Amino acid sequence: MWCWAKLPNLRNLQGLQIQLSNISLLAVRNNTCGSKNDLKQVLKSKVAAEQERIKKFRKEHGKFKVGEITIDMMYGGMRGIKGLVYETSLLDTNEGIRFRGLSIPECNEVLPKAPEGCEPLPEGIFWLLLTGDCPTEENVRWLSKEWSKRAKLPAHVLQMLENLPKDVHPMAQFVAGIAACSSESKFAKGYTEGMTKAQYWEYAYEDVMDLLANLPLIAAVIYNRFYKNEETCMKVDTSKDWSYNFAKLIGFDDPGFVEMLRLYLTLHCDHEGGNVSAHAVHLVGSALSDPYLAFSAGMAGLAGPLHGLANQEVLVWLSKLKQKLGESPSEDQIKGYVEETLKSGQVVPGYGHAVLRKTDPRYISQKEFAEKHFPDYPLYKIVSTLYKVAPPVLQATGKIQNPWPNVDAHSGVLMQYYGLTQMNFYTVFFGVSRAIGVLSALIWSRALGLPIERPKSMTTDALMELVKSSKK
Ligand code: CMX
């Protein structure tokens, strides 16, 4: 059983002791590299030790059986099969996600904030996921500066985005923009020029840093052209953080919106390795496709309505609810709307999860933000009423494993409140955030020398034969 020592109310942890049964381990260490802010150097000091630790572990326990696979699991989307190593985060069915051992409330508490803000900076969670260390304020300031220095979109990418027809969905534009940046890949160039396997992670790191620096620019070009018919002013302020610059690029300078974006970009960053976007990046990256190509594959997966696009679907669904029932519907009316949705054979977007069996802590964190900043906003009230009335209706079907809301049930409301009303852009925000986690994991996959992924598939006939021969 997990038992957490009470968190010190400190911005920079001096070392956080965690008890796991009788074992005491240091899950999050403070940045041991003293004044060093250069992330690559910090990482360098960890890679060799981690390679050695895993080598020893595999030598001693490589043949240990982790689980069994049933035919239902194979037809059921591989639920419950433990088949991937992914270092940056781990999802507990009941408790939700932990980033390098820290829960969301713990991250919100300990990660550095902007000088004028209260919400965690996404730069901090990137540092945490990549190094396992809780960053100092100095670390995140270094990272903000580093990303703003690297922000420079190639002209041909800009031109390609400008030439796309306006009815191409923003997520399809996002995928295309990211893939087109592959022309700049240091990893791909290094491979062609004969980099060694030991160097893979360093080249991947450079691409990841460039990509993270440029994602807000790609997103902003799409947003400004699609919704405002405007060219994007590509200037970023090197004295400001990533979220501030992103908000500014799309024309939002309300400090409330910027704070919301900092929280949003932190919360959506990672959800262990088996979800569609993370797994796609991991899989494509394992073929040594460069980080731009691997990440664009992940974003194509995030664009599916059962995954990241659910945040858009939630708002579309809520808009129809408001059209039908008005701004302030009663509990009974909202319950009736959920029942009608189910009766018509549609999913209730924002509810359910493949792994989680409780309310998503990312939902709770967004709810707390809304409660603090706009408790009387009518759309927030509808979302809160849904939280009360939808789970029993979903549970009553008898087939839905998790009747509780996931992250996507709340995010759109935050955007709507601050005036970002263009719903089909919401998944792009999700994607910018998801880059933080899946690309940190990609660097570690190359650092650990993980091979090309190639699970065995079977035909139904071959499975039937397997069952038959086991009975002989
Ligand atoms: N509304 C209606 N039906 C639902 C449902 C929901 N919110 N959630 C699950 N179900 C249905 C499934 O479609 C499935 O029906 P069939 O047996 O007829 O095919 C049945 O309940 C069992 O599904 P499950 O085991 O509970 O859930 P899965 O692991 O198969 O699917 C998920 C998980 C998220 C795809 C599903 O809950 C869903 O479609 N939710 C709505 C979309 C959504 O919010 N997605 C975002 C998830 C978070 C993210 O990745 O971003």
Image (tube, helix red, strand yellow):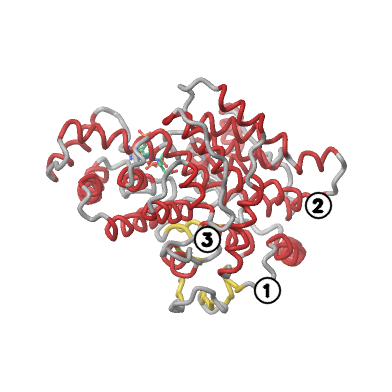
Callout 2 touching callout 3 (CB < 8 Å): no
- Tell me which residue sits at (43%, 64%) in the image: 116
Badge 1 element: loop
Q: Nearer the viewer, mark 1 or mark 3?
A: 1
Name the image quarter holding residue 146.
bottom right
- Tell me which residue sits at (36%, 53%) in the image: 363
> Dividing the image into 4 quarters, which one contains the N terminus?
bottom left
Q: CA distance from mark 2 to mark 1?
A: 25 Å
Up the image or down, 430 lies above or below 106; here it is: above
Q: In the rendering, which numbered label is found on residue 199?
A: 2
**Left or right of 310 in this view: 293:** right
**Left or right of 381 in this view: 63:** right
Task: Residue under label 1, please give it.
Answer: 35
Q: CA distance from mark 2 to mark 3?
A: 26 Å
Q: Is residue 271 visible?
A: no
Q: Is residue 238 visible?
A: yes
Q: In the rendering, which numbered label is found on residue 99?
A: 3
- Going by the numbered disc 3, the residue's amino acid type is Phe
Q: Position of residue 153 (x, y in %)?
A: 63, 38
Disc 2 packing (10 Å; few <14; some 14–19; many ≥20): some
Q: CA distance from mark 1 to mark 3?
A: 24 Å
Q: How many marks?
A: 3
Disc 3 packing (10 Å; few <14; some 14–19; many ≥20): many
Up the image or down, 277 lies above or below 231; here it is: below
- Tell me which residue sits at (19%, 31%) in the image: 323
**Of callouts 2 and 1, the N-terminal one:** 1
Q: Position of residue 128 (x, y in %)?
A: 58, 63
